[in-house]
Amino acid sequence: MNWEYLQPVTIQFGNGIRKELKAAAESLGCKDGLLVADPFFAASGLAEQLVSESGGILTGIYSEVSPNPDVTEVDACAKLLRENKHGFVVALGGGSALDCAKAAASICLTNDSIRKYHGTGEAMPLAHLPLIAVPTTAGTGSEVTCVSVLTDHANGKKSPIVSNGFYPSIALIDPELTYSMPPKVTASTGIDVLCHALEGFWSKGHQPVCDALAQHACKLVFTYLKRAYVDGSDREAREKMAEASVIAGLAFTLPKTTASHACSFPLTNLYHIPHGEACGLTLDYFARINASAEGGRLETFAKEIGFAGVEEMAERIHALKEELGLLTDLKHLNLTDAQIDELVRISRHPNLYNNPVEITDEMLSGMYESFR
Ligand SMILES: NC(=O)c1ccc[n+]([C@@H]2O[C@H](COP(=O)([O-])OP(=O)(O)OC[C@H]3O[C@@H](n4cnc5c(N)ncnc54)[C@H](O)[C@@H]3O)[C@@H](O)[C@H]2O)c1
Ligand SMILES: [Zn+2]
C-alpha cells in the first residue's frame, strides 16, 4: 500500500495556551491582525480582551458568523480584510468561525466572491493570509484541516471546500475555552469527533498514520464525552475531548469523511439539525454497513478499542446518543415520502463516494424510512 502523510500545522496544546497568542503571531512575523470571533466570545468580552492583550498586533474584530457560516459572511469578512489591509487572521470559535476565517483569509487576496469556489469544482487559489486557529468546541478539528464547510442559504447548498491554502499556520488548542459550551453543544460537537475518527478510519482514503490517530481519538470519546456532558467543569474530560478533537481532525483531513457527513448536509440544511448531531444520527447505521468492508478491518478496529466487535460498538454509539440527549430518529419531523426522496437525493454528496461500501438510493431510503 502506498501512502503519503502531510500535516503542516504547528499545534500548541494546553490549558491557558491562548495566552501564547501574541508570541505565536510574532513567531510568524505578523501584524495588523483581524480577530474573527464567534459571537459568543464577542459578547463574553474575551474577543476584546485578546485584542487588548495583543500589544497592538490585533487591530480589529469581525464577529458576524452564524452556525453553518454563510458564503455572504465569508465575503463580508474578506471585504473587511481587504479594506483594512489586515496582515493576518486569528480565528476564535467553533468550526463555524474557523471555517469562515479560513475561507476569508484566502478569498480576500482575490476580487472574487467565495461562491465561485463553493460546490462548483473550481480550485481555490492557494495564496492566503497567515491564520492562527483557536478552537472553542471539541469539535470539528478545523484548526488542523484543509477544509472549510460553508453554506449558501439562498441557494440551499451546504458543501465543503478543500484547499491546501486552508491549513492554519498555528493551532492554539486551549481546553479551558471549551468549558463554557452548554451540554447540548458539548454533546453535538463531541459526537462529531467520533464521526471524524470512524469515518476517517473506514474512508476509502484511509492510511496507517490516520488509522492510528483514529483509534486514539475513538478511545478518548468513548471514555470522556459522557463525562464532559454530565459535568462541563470536569477538567480532565474537557482536556481529553479537546485532545480527541484535534487528533480526529488529523485522522480525517487526508482520508476525508464519508456517508455520515454526506447525509448530514441535507439534515442540517433542510431541518436545522446541528452539524455533529446530524452526522451522529447515521453513524451506527453506517458502522454496521461498513463492518465487513475491506476484509473486515472495522471489525478488527472495534476489537482493538475494547468492543466485542462492530455490532457492540454500534450499540454503544446508539446508547451514547440517548445518554447525551441526541437524536436517534427523525420521528419529530413527520417526514412525507417526498421529503424522504429529497433527503436521499441531496445525500448523494461527493463524500458518499468515499464510503468503503457503495451506498445505493435504496439503502438511503431504507435508512431514512427507519428513522420515521
Ligand atoms: N473544517 C472542518 O474540517 C470541519 C469539520 C467538521 C465540521 N465542520 C463545520 O463546522 C461547523 C460546526 O462547528 P461546531 O460544531 O464547532 O459548532 P459552531 O462553531 O457552529 O458552534 C455551535 C454553537 O456553539 C457556540 N459556541 C462555540 N463555542 C462555544 C463555547 N466555548 N462556549 C459557548 N458557546 C460556544 C456557537 O456560538 C454556536 O452557537 C459546521 O458548519 C460544520 O459543517 C467543519
Ligand atoms: Zn464533522
Image (cartoon, rainbow, N blue to C red):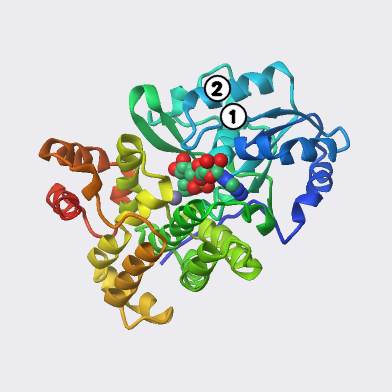
Classify residue 170 as left or right of residue 247.
right
- Label 1, secondary structure: give it: helix
Q: Residue at x 39, y 36 (%)?
A: 159
Query: Would residue 8 be found to the left or right of residue 295 on screen?
Result: right
Residue reaching furthest to the right: 55
Cα distance in 3D space between marks 2 and 1: 7 Å
Whether 41 is drawn above or below 137: the answer is above
Seen at 67% across and 52% down, the residue is 177
User: Does residue 303 appear left or right of residue 364 in this picture?
Assistant: right
**Is label 2 in a helix, a strand or a loop?**
helix
On the image, numbered disc 1 is attached to which residue?
Answer: 104
User: Is 164 or 107 nearer to us in this picture?
Assistant: 107
Residue 313 image-quadrant placement: bottom left
- Check the picture and name the quadrant holding the N terminus: bottom left
Q: Amino acid at mark 1?
A: Ala
Depicted 75 relative to depicted 307: above or below: above
For the residues labelled 2 and 1, say whether their Cβ atoms are less than 8 Å apart.
Answer: yes
Q: Is residue 150 visible?
A: yes
Q: Badge 2 local density, few (<14 within 10 Å), some, or many (20+)?
A: many
Q: Quadrant of residue 356?
A: bottom left
In this figure, which residue is indicated by the disc labeled 2? 75
Which of the pair 43/124 is nearer the observer?
Answer: 43
- Placement of 141 over or under 45, stated as above or below: below
